Image: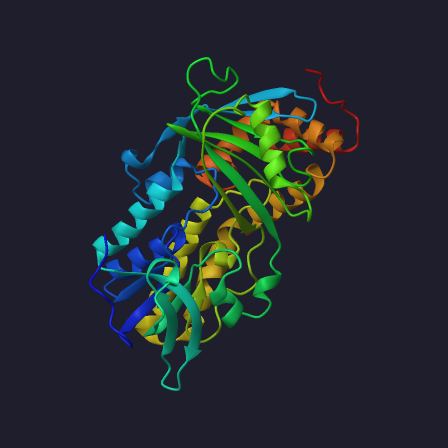
């Protein structure tokens, strides 16, 4: 779904650079609020992603069941020694989406709300003396058109992913955000009996230094396909070889490979999301991917919603301080979770001995229940204080070596 061609030097209330879940959400929210919006996105972009979305996202952002390609009701956690721990989802399910289809659905929804879609590649941004910003881009598929085009706006939202070009040009030290480089292969779902370990309603998560020295590997079902991937920030570590080994372990080595994708994933929110003038960031560009889990779709869409609200307030009042509210609101609600997950990753993901202990902790029923409740509700669960105390004591026992990892 494409809008009428954008004219050179056309002026909008807001230009959104990047049409992933965050950018599409920004465009939808601003268009619904009555602002003129242009959504600029590269053609053919598909982010490597496991594709898991929690029930809260489905509810908060009104995602139709037609977008859910698989419904997962359990996770299997696998340790370096091949010990397996199953974590059933006791209430509800985890939805799985195909990013190529899901992202396009969200972009079309933005267009249906009134946003103008433009296909092209962002090049640069220029501040004007009149308070407007000019965005320069090369239009067409992969920006192959020779002519540089430009549009103007009162506000610009950078939602162009990790290593955001908008952020690099407008925010200090944006390029210093630590990233994990993720790589996955989309494969055909195995036929009955072709891969006995594979189940179409279960996510498999591998904590193994051979699969990733500082992250994890995954096998996520997507209905007719599956995502098999891993990530690492360690230079020189071969993600392609690791995914090959993971496919062999999972019994998926011989199934058809449909496509391969790789991209950096930020694991720490930027300290600033706005330039103090008229540019604000959202999604991966703002660094809102959860450490340890690498979960990003929910946080990207929430950040998009918050950045849209901040941009709308700025457009309404002209007060640039309104732009600071997006990050403040996000960190107030999720900053503590990000800090805890970051500490988990730094400790538990460093050696196979610690990974074995981490998988042992995952076998605990209190841990499982609170993990799923926190994931599905997207907040720290507070209604079971004694369960938190029990988990803390068990974690300390594992940290001090007072509990040996269980044998499988």
Where's residue 78, x and y in %?
Answer: 62, 25
The residue depicted at 56 percent of the width and 27 percent of the height is 247
Relative to residue 76, is residue 40 drawn left or right? left
Can the viewer see residue 402? yes
Considering every residue shown, the one lying at the far bottom of the view is 129
Say left or right for 14 vs 200: left
**As drawn, 173 above or below 91:** below
Farthest top residue? 193
Q: Residue at x 59, y 39 (%)?
A: 240
Question: As rendered, which of 44 and 13 lies closer to the eye?
Answer: 44
| Residue placed furthest toward the right | 401
Tell me where residue 258 appears, x and y as whole percent.
43, 35
Which quadrant would residue 389 be assigned to in this image?
top right
Task: For residue 216, say whether it is visible.
Answer: no
Residue 125 vertical placement versus 78 (above, below): below
x and y percentages locating residue 312 in the rendered image: 33, 66
Q: Is residue 203 above or below residue 63?
A: above
Give how far across and how far down residue 2 sits, in percent: 23, 56
């Amino acid at each position: 779904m494409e809008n009428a061609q954008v004219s050179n030097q056309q002026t909008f209330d807001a230009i959104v650079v990047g049409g992933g879940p965050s950018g599409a959400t920004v465009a939808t929210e601003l268009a619904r609020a009555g602002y003129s919006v242009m959504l600029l996105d590269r053609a053919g972009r598909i982010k490597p992603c496991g594709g898991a979305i929690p029930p809260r996202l489905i509810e908060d952002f009104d995602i139709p069941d037609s977008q859910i390609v698989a419904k997962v009701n359990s996770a299997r956690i696998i340790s370096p020694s091949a010990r397996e721990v199953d974590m059933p989802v006791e209430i509800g399910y985890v939805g799985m989406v195909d990013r190529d289809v899901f992202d396009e659905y969200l972009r079309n929804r933005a267009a249906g709300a009134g946003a103008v879609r433009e296909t092209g590649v962002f090049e640069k941004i220029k501040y004007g003396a009149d308070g407007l910003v000019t965005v320069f881009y090369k239009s067409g598929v992969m920006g192959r058109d020779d002519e540089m085009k430009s549009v103007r706006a009162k506000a610009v939202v950078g939602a162009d992913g990790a290593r955001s070009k908008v952020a690099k040009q407008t925010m200090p030290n944006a390029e210093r955000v630590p990233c994990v480089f993720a790589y996955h292969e989309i494969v055909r779902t195995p036929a009955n009996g072709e891969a006995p370990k594979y189940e179409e309603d279960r996510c498999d998560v591998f904590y193994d230094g051979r699969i990733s020295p500082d992250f994890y590997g995954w096998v996520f079902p997507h209905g007719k396909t599956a995502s098999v991937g891993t990530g690492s920030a360690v230079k020189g570590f071969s993600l392609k070889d690791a995914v090959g080994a993971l496919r062999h372990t999972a019994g998926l080595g011989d199934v058809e490979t449909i496509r391969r994708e790789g991209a950096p994933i930020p694991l720490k929110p930027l300290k600033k999301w706005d330039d103090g003038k008229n540019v604000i960031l959202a999604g991966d560009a703002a660094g809102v991917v959860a450490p340890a889990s690498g979960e990003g779709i929910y946080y990207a869409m929430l950040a998009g919603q918050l950045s849209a609200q901040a941009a709308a307030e700025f457009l309404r009042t002209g007060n640039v301080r309104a732009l600071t509210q997006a990050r403040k609101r996000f960190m107030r609600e999720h900053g503590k979770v990000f800090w805890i997950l970051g500490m988990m990753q730094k400790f538990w993901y460093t050696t196979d001995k610690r990974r074995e202990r981490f998988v042992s902790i995952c076998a605990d029923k209190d841990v499982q229940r609170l993990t799923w409740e926190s994931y599905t509700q997207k907040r720290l669960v507070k209604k079971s204080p004694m369960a938190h105390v029990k988990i803390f004591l068990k974690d300390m026992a594992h940290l001090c070596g007072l509990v040996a990892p269980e044998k499988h």
